[in-house]
Amino acid sequence: MRFFEHEARQIVEAAGIPVTKYGFCTSAEQARRAAEEIGGPVVIKSQVLSGGRMKAGGVKFADTPEEAAAHAADILELEINGHMPRGVLVDPKAEVKQEYYASVVWDGTAKRPLMLFSDMGGIDIEEVAESHPDHVGRGHVSNLRPIFDFEAKQVVAATGVTGSQLNRATPILAKLARLFRDNDMTLAEINPLAELADGSFVALDAHMEMENEAVGRQKGLLRRRLEIAEDDTRETYEPSDFERHVAAIDAADHRGVIQGKDHGFEGNLGLVIGAGGGSLTLTDAVRSQGGKPANYSEIGGNPSVAKACGLAKEVLEKDGVEKIAVMMSIVSNTRVDIVARGVIKACLELGKDPGETIAIFRIPGAWEDEGFKILERYGVESCDRSVSLWEAAGRAVAKIQGATA
Amino acid sequence: MAEALNKVFIDVEVDASVAGDAALAKKLEEVCPVDIFKATDTGVEIVEKNLDECVLCKLCIEAAPAGTVHVRKLYDSTELA
Amino acid sequence: MSILLDKETTFIVQGITGREAVNLTRECLDYGSKVVGGVTPGRKGREVHGVPVFDTVAQAVENHGGQIDGSVVTVPPAFTKDAVLEAIENGIKLIVIVTERIPRRDVAQMVELADLRGARIIGPNCLGLIVPEVCKMGGIGGPAKDAAKAYAPGPVGVMSRSGGMTTEISSSLTQAGLGVSTAVSIGGDAIIGSTYAELMPYFEADEQTEAIVIYTEPGGRMEAQLSAWVKENDSRLPIIAFMAGKFMDDEEMKGMSFGHAGTIVEGVEDTATEKIARLEAAGIPVVERIDEIPNAVKQKLEASA
């Protein structure tokens, strides 16, 4: 789950990391008042979940509260990469002496959180790590023990930072690591961590992402502190009608699992496939053999006939879909005959002939013998486990190309 | 033309001789994992919209007197024994 | 010989009274696995297919009269960590976590404790592991009859991020007359107990295993780790890889999550193309089509002979 900058700012602040005085505003008037309170030049930043804000004109400087209001008014109406802002952040324009970088990420190989620190902040950390490796400090923290300040100190010191800067940066990095762990973050980044003219350190920009699986247990932070609504999931893109309908069918019936995605897909062959690895393999196989999938999907667990039917119908009703291919890797939990009933029913309910509409049915496994009886009765072309996923996909493609030819 | 179809794959029938039996009706309602049977004051009622969900478990056949509950597979014209 | 399991391996099922666990317990028993107890707090005294249920792992161990080798954990995500830590602290050395959607932080804690205690975790979000005709731990392969059809004993070790694909690939090896020494569904999450590289030493030490097949997807750095391992160790085992999800490299797909939790394309390092290049550079061929796997394995076996 992604956070807006102003939310990340609140998270960081709540963890005891110093931030500047700031205001989150949803109107030009609020921005004017925030700028007044801050006193002095400010920067107005669009609050969207997209990069490239500066380039798109979503970050503007203002010397007076009136200017701040004017910029806010503009930015509040400015669409950036398809996103409309939720508001603007009004920040004091800071007198920065030096910019640092501090973040915590998951290291999947070490299976521990990794602290990263650099005295070359404000720019792309990956670039710094490549060109100036001795300016990047790294250190893992334990998942079981408390995180001690000295662990953060070691990481900061590794970049050569010493003196009062070391003593100010250390607790900030340690707090960042603790907040990363306590809040189930997958990314907690402060860039830049600024040393101001007076020697104090503040988080000028913060970027946070929380693991979706943990959202359910972070209600304190999400609902009470940040007041984020439960249905505000911040997906990277707007789900299509197809995706929403399939999700609704899935949610309404606890028997089995279905999922459908069509973002970026445009084709005439609908895919009712499963599950996980099987779906990925089959989608590749269809495309590699010249097929044009209309969607991706997953069907798994122990679905009801209604659920399988629901998914197949949604796929069949997509614009441009001429046939569907029903294919899965060997199943033990999913019943072949139940899926067969579901997909055939989908065709019948839409007034289509199952034999014509289902290009291929390839699901080996539990209750397959019963499944074959049903498929035979309705004239659906099917194959057993001796036909690979690749081959089955190829047959589906050949069938649909033969039909359109 | 997207109306729901029922009784495409499976048909279930309970003999008239026992269909009115309240105790049997209750038992059938209990054992069926997909709610094909409903117990009413007049005995057992078949819930048509759930027929195609039948998982061929035979629990209904076992719960009733022999030969009184018929589960028919319409796709191969056989009856579950 | 196989890895991690043998004919004497004993294990419990934690969360045994749950719907999925009841099924998998039946399957494992039918397969001949020694399921010696189950744990569901509050249900002590019950039985699942003849397996006694206890409130605690300690009770199960006491009842067994000595150390229990393994546990299959199907406990819901909010309680999985507690169950796994309990297993580890009661001397269990091989833990298969079936549960999915466990927050990473919990998984990392379980793995760190397992490391400290010399225990090994497989999963989470996995179907377990199987040594054909010897032992099955988890739902892998399904009912005993189906598992027997798909898994014949042989010289190929299989490791897969997808449970279903473990069986699909193993079945194709069986159909080709090759067979499997041990197949491990390692799980689909971003952090797992045992990666390919971490399991390689076991296969290396197993006389029966003569080749390895891995199934992988975009996301994560396991292939980099495996490639590094292969370079640093003079492994006798040829490895064949198959990668699914190559379509995710496409521009329109970036940022979408498909399949398993850990499969989100971010940055060049994790794309399918980069991974394939890395594997091939380490001497691990990546076959284009899934049905090419058996022949690719046969070629490697003939070359080694």
Image: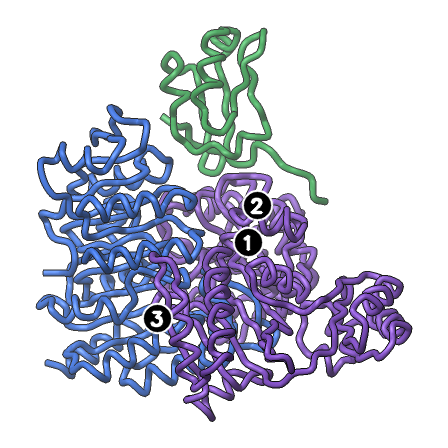
Using the rendered image of the protein, determine whether residue A202 is visible from the camera's viewpoint: yes
Question: Residue under circle 2?
Answer: A250
The quarter of the rendered structure image containing the N terminus of chain A is: bottom right
- Image quarter for residue A109? bottom left
Q: Colour of chain B?
A: green
Question: B40 above or below B3?
Answer: above
Question: Are discs 2 and 1 located on one and the same chain?
Answer: yes
Are the residues flagged by discs 2 and 1 in contact, CB closer than 8 Å? yes
Q: Colour of chain C?
A: blue
- Residue at horizontal 27 percent and vertical 43 percent from the top: C86
Question: A170 above or below B71?
Answer: below
Q: Which mark is residue A109?
A: 3
Q: Chain of mark 3?
A: A
Image location of residue A42, percent across then percent down: 78, 75
Question: Residue under circle 1?
Answer: A259
Position of A353 with respect to A328 (left or right) is right
- Tell which tag, 3 or 1, sits nearer the viewer: 3
Q: Colour of chain A?
A: purple
Question: A23 above or below B37?
Answer: below
Q: Chain of mark 1?
A: A
> N-terminal of the two: label 3 or label 2?
3
Label 2 residue SS: helix
Position of C147 with respect to A18 (left or right) is left
Badge 3, how many Cα within 10 Å: few under 14, some, many 20+? some
- Residue at horizontal 77 percent and vertical 69 percent from the top: A90
